[in-house]
Image (cartoon, rainbow, N blue to C red):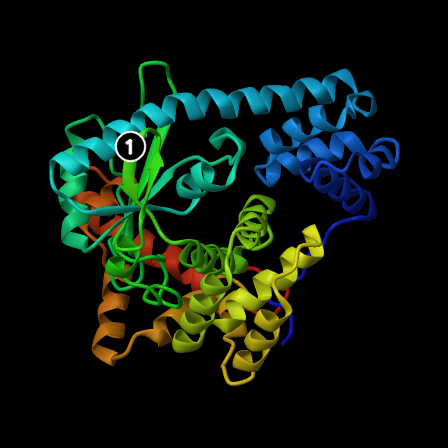
Amino acid sequence: MHPIATPNSGLSSAEQAAMALVLALIEQRPSEAAQAPPGTTKIAVDLAAKHQVSALMHAGLHKSHANAHFSPEDLQRLTAAANSAAIFETSHAKECATVFKQLDEARIPFVVFKGTHLAYTLYPSPYLRERCDTDILFRSKNDALKAIQLFKTRGYEVPETMDADLYSYEKDLLKRDALGIGHAFDFHWKVRSDNLFADFISFDDLYHSGTSNIAGQKVHVPSLSQALLIAATHRLSHAAEGLANQLYWLKDIQLLLGKLSGEDWNKALRVTKENGISYALLDSLNVVAQYFETSAPLYVVEALEQQVSHEHIPYDYFLDTKAKALHSFKLLPSWRQRAGLVWQIVFPRAEYIRTRYDRTSPASLPLGYIEHIWHLFKKYLPTEKGKET
């Protein structure tokens, strides 16, 4: 199996040295951190911010007693980022508790998954798992829309989108509190908002897996094996944007590896085989092993390699955003649905056109649709490799 997202691809030698320093600190390996070349720390702080591991690196820095290698400016930047993450977490935890409680009171079943679930499950303190939102899964789109109406009354806004419900299965809710801190919730009705990985696990499977204390509330969460598969497919869903190897996603997977039992691994192997997504887990395990030197059990790797030999790996899906869109289109089971998706994308609701293209008057609305179609034409027009439209 060829790597889907090659580790450290595109990094200069200086950036690779900085990446090694970041990894040494978040893994609390002080002897390796001390060997970092001069001038590496500034780039390392930049990379930590890009990969959303500044708080984790800051904690590792103090535990490793490696402060002397950092300039006062770099230390200040890293400390400020960690403080910002902690402040956000304190405020967002209160918001999460209120949201979870109101969903329970409204008797709308939900599952908390992805970043917020992992922050409270895997990390010593949830602020160390940086994130900008909380993901909540509902049994159906209808339940998600009920929840959206509920939280509109609490000051949340829902950005206008194209509502292509044959391609995207989530809605964002945004709000800024009295202190100016932004809160975002992603309301999903499928586990992934793309057709490749949207249906490999159901809401009911997740809902009945167990509960956990998140932000002081008892909520339904995925099992460890389910969380691993969600993390593995999530990172590959962003491969076309060049984001598959974000350190905070890889760190999630590494920490999950340390908690899985033999039974958990067997469940993961069964789900990947049944859904033909063994390659997603195998690629993630290979990358994590290269970054963190943490490996899955040998029998798991061998079983995945055997399963992958019988799977079709859609490499084009991970190539770029145009190829991803085309492959998602092909994944729809009927031409009726494909035609419906094209219609939803080319002719979205009028409110979206008014907001997206600033066409407020009725007379200007047709011009908004023309502008939208031209935008799509430029975005998806096939081009020669290496050229952009």
Q: In this view, does 47 lie to the left or right of 131?
A: right
Question: Which one is nearer the viewer's eye here, 248 or 269?
Answer: 269
Residue drawn 21% across the image and 26% down it: 155
Asked if residue 65 is positioned above or below residue 122 in the image, the reply reads: above
Label 1, secondary structure: give it: strand
Res 174 visible: no
Quadrant in which residue 331 is drawn:
bottom left
User: In x, y percent, where is residue 297?
Assistant: 61, 65
Q: In which quarter of the image is residue 169?
A: bottom left
Q: Can residue 286 be seen in this view?
A: yes
The foreground one among 73 and 116 is: 116
Q: Which residue is pictured at 47% across the width and 32% down the height?
A: 126
Image-based side of 343 in relation to 31, left or right? left
Query: Residue 82, percent across and down?
Result: 57, 24
Give 152 or 378, whichever is nearer the viewer.
152
Residue that protrudes farthest toward the bottom in the picture: 310
Residue carrying label 1: 217
- Residue occupying the point 33% across, 58% down: 373
Q: Position of residue 27 (x, y in %)?
A: 69, 40
Instruction: Establish if 20 lies above or below 284.
Output: above
